[in-house]
Image (cartoon, rainbow, N blue to C red):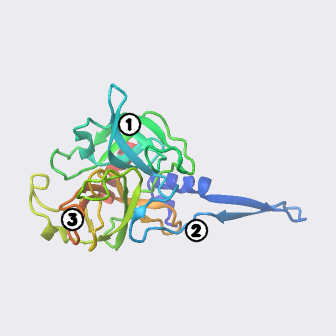
Amino acid sequence: MKPCTSLSHSTVSCLVDKESFREDISGFSFPIEAGPIYQTLDRCMSNTPHIIGGGPALAREFPHAARLGHRSDADQVDWFCGGTLISDRHVLTAAHCHYSPQGSVNIVRLGDLEFDTDIEDADPQDFSVRDYTMHPEYYYPEMYNDISVVTLSRPVIFNEYIQPACLPFDDGRAVSSFIAIGWGQVESIPRTENKRLQKVRLYNYGTRCRITSDKIDELPEGYNATTQLCIGSKEHKDTCNGDSGGPVLICHDDHPCMYHVMGITSVGVACDTPDIPGMYTRVHFYLDWINQQLSKK
């Protein structure tokens, strides 16, 4: 375990939450004056990652997964972005999600697995948005500094379905592969609406995006290796429409059922095109700014 003195409040919090919901403590009584001896059984250690090639997520596999949307005055909700719970009041997402044609983000769903059904193993809860803060150097429609922290209207009560992800220990340059999750479409043609949370393993393409991405209106200076991750696959595996704002993750070194959010789904060059990686906001670069937002009351 990394020393806590080097970790953010959110990272320490996510480890404490792991102890609350992933560990069973059992007592063994012995005839000694010291009293019972307790043994901690770590349910997390036996819960190894299930991602191989991609597919539906399992129940409680990603308890930090958030879905963001807009609730209209007529009480109709359009869901259009993803996010990551990082504390009991804050969700990390992409800044461009606040410019959706459906309206800005004003509702967050936590604890869900498959929308529009009550039979799955889940605990869906909706939270109103108190406010949100986009990075001060994000300028829509450009995709640089594409990061936002959403503040919920009330604290989250953690359980086995709803828990925060950890913030990153490093910038991800040495990471070979990531796990992307989201409720976005599962096929680019035809567009297929997806109700169930999906997962896929994607790979670190280093600085390949300098070659594969042209300078466009959203990225007038091209790929920025300091603030963006370049991630993709040689196969037909990708994030796509509706996945924006959701996380790309790595497993925690000591507790494989826990995750660090390394990136935020931001901009794709060609959805579902082999060997054409997309660009994701590099979360580690923004840690100081994120922690400033978490410290606000």
| Nearer to us in this view, 189 or 104 | 189
Query: 95 or 133, which lies in front?
Result: 95
Q: Quadrant of residue 135?
A: top left
Q: Which residue is mark 1?
A: 107
Which of these two is toward me, 5 or 252? 252
Q: Which mark is nearer the camera, 3 or 2?
A: 2
Decide if residue 175 is in sight here.
no
Which disc, if any, is residue 225? 3
Task: Name the image quarter holding the C terminus.
Answer: top left
Of labels 1 and 2, the one closer to you: 1
Residue 169 position within the rendered picture, expressed as x and y whole percent measured from the top left: 40, 63
Picture quarter containing residue 235? bottom left
Residue most toward the right?
31
Residue 108 in which image quadrant = top left
User: Helix, strand or loop at disc 2?
Assistant: loop
Closer to the chain start, of discs 3 and 2, is 2
**SS of the residue under disc 3:** loop
Percent across and percent down for residue 224 are 18, 62
- Identify residue type, mark 2: Met
Q: Residue at x 28, y 36 (%)?
A: 104
**Residue 97: % across, % down:** 27, 44
The disc label shown at residue 266, or none = none
Mark 1 against mark 3, which lies toward the viewer? Answer: 1
Going by the numbered disc 1, the residue's amino acid type is Ile
Say if 89 sits above or below 52 in the image.
above
Q: Quick check: 164 above or below 222?
A: above
What residue is disc 2 on?
A: 45
On screen, 46 above or below 14? below
Residue occupying the far top of the picture: 73
Count of marks placed on residues: 3
Cα–Cα gap, marks 1 and 3:
32 Å
Chain-order first, disc 1 or disc 2: 2
